[in-house]
Image (spheres, helix red, strand yellow):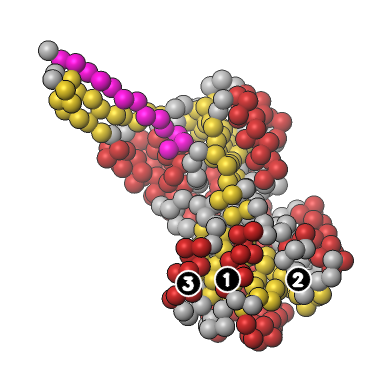
Amino acid sequence: MRERARMLFDMRAVFENNFDKLTRVLSQDHGRTIGEAIGSVRRVIENIESACTALYGLAKQNEHMDQLANGIDQYLIWEPLGAFLIITPGNIPIHAWSSFVPYALAAGCTVVVSPSRQDPVAAEAIYKVALEVGFPPGVINLVHRGRQVNREILSHPNIKRVGFIGSNVAGKDLFEMCGKLGKTSSTNGNGKNHLIIMPDADMEMGTEWLMRSCFGLAGQRCLDVDNMVIIGDGYEEVKTLFKEASEKMKLGYGLDDTVENGPMTTLAGKGKVIQWIDTSLSEGAKMVIDGRSVKVEDYPNGYFLGPTIIEDVNVDMPMAKEEAFGPVAALIRGENLEQAIDWINTKTNVGHSACIMTGNGKNARRFIREVNVGNVGVNVGVAQPYAFFPLGSRRESFIGTAKSRMASMRMFMDEKTITARWG
């Protein structure tokens, strides 16, 4: 354990030394802004730090009962299970890596990482940086092939379990396969997130939160908000402030530090978001800002989508229940907090995150207690837990035995109890 701890601390230093390199690669391969890339690499290092604490915390999990009976001692130890398959998505290629890999190493396991084909350069970069630490050959492995090779790897008897972040469709397919193979998983899928704006919300600060919440990473983040529910008489004010701020958002090349939003990662992803917008309009929604035809100077062939805001959205519309996964916000009029909570809990089958903007502690406490999602935000745009907390998704947003990050230690290890008799 001491050697693993030393190498994890070395890993933190290696990632700090490669910080600028990783941020540039991530921005160029994924498309996000350099500021967003800096935040992502910082989250990676926080996960490594959290894994260091998890490793030393193992000593506290072992239990010992001396002289349980006459001449009998009993104790419990935690042991690493072996090799794991880790599947990472295209929208957060290195953050997802760090949500599992450092914890697996802390537990004493090995990993085979299978990244998305959308941004393989970023996956290769983090793999090479990790190898600089000096882990023995075969501890950290990388395979580029996609879904078919994932099934083959998971079928191998030496692969004990799988950690996955991606779509619900792919996640359920893996989960079903795990059931047939008698293996367990941490399967983290889609969201359909809501942000509730109460009449007493501070909109001077709140407008900035809305921009991050709906349009950050070009909307390609499982914690981003699609549905914005505005309670009471403040609808027109919120809409006007949000519209004005959105129209000023600068799009462009991610390494330009004046740019506020980059392109979509793939042309196919852009096409799906446009289809989501078109379908919403055909169902009766109305356009407030149309970002489908945005033009970015010097980048005529870029996969850009401008901020798009629609209104007159009904919570029973199919698109109000389906994740857009792009820079889109749907404005919904709500009567009261009770109604908004009911919509979140009953109108979708997913439970990733929900946020509320309010100056009223009673409303905030009620929202926290009653909303059936795993990640709750109060006066923040994105309910992003820090590394030492799990990503607490619920309902169809998560299936498996343990959440990611710190909680994944329960997946990488198993208990063993020992009963010993001495004369």
Tell me which corner region of the image, top left, top right, bottom left or bottom right, holds residue 322: bottom right
Residue at image x 36%, y 44%?
Answer: 54
Tell me which corner region of the image, top left, top right, bottom left or bottom right, holds residue 127: top right
Q: Which of marks 1 and 2 is nearer the N terminus?
A: 2
Q: How far apart are marks 3 and 1 (CA)?
A: 12 Å
Q: Which residue lies furthest to the top in this view?
A: 423
What is the crowding at mark 3: few (fewer than 14 residues within 10 Å), some, or many (at least 20)?
some
- Secondary structure beneath label 1: helix
Closer mark to the observer between disc 3 and disc 1: 1
Is residue 400 visible in the rendered image? The answer is: yes
Residue at image x 84%, y 66%?
Answer: 283
Q: Where is residue 268 in the image (x, y as percent from the top left)?
A: 80, 52
Q: Which of 362 and 131 is in front in this view?
A: 362
Q: How far apart are marks 1 and 2 (CA)?
A: 19 Å
Q: Earlier in the sequence, mark 3 or mark 1?
A: 1
Answer yes or no: do the residues labelled 1 and 2 have beta carbons within 8 Å?
A: no
Locate the N terminus and report the quarter of the image it occupies.
Answer: top left
Residue at image x 40%, y 30%?
Answer: 414
Residue at image x 15%, y 15%?
Answer: 422
Report if residue 64 lies within the magenta region.
no
Answer yes or no: do the residues labelled 2 and 3 have beta carbons within 8 Å?
A: no
The residue identified by callout 1 is 338
The residue identified by callout 2 is 313
Q: Distance between the residues labelled 2 and 3?
A: 25 Å
Q: Which amino acid does label 1 sit on?
A: Glu
- Secondary structure beneath label 3: helix
Q: Find the magenta span and give its range.
A: 410-422
The residue identified by callout 3 is 364
Q: Where is residue 216 in the image (x, y as percent from the top left)?
A: 62, 65
Q: Where is residue 399 in the image (x, y as percent from the top left)?
A: 57, 42
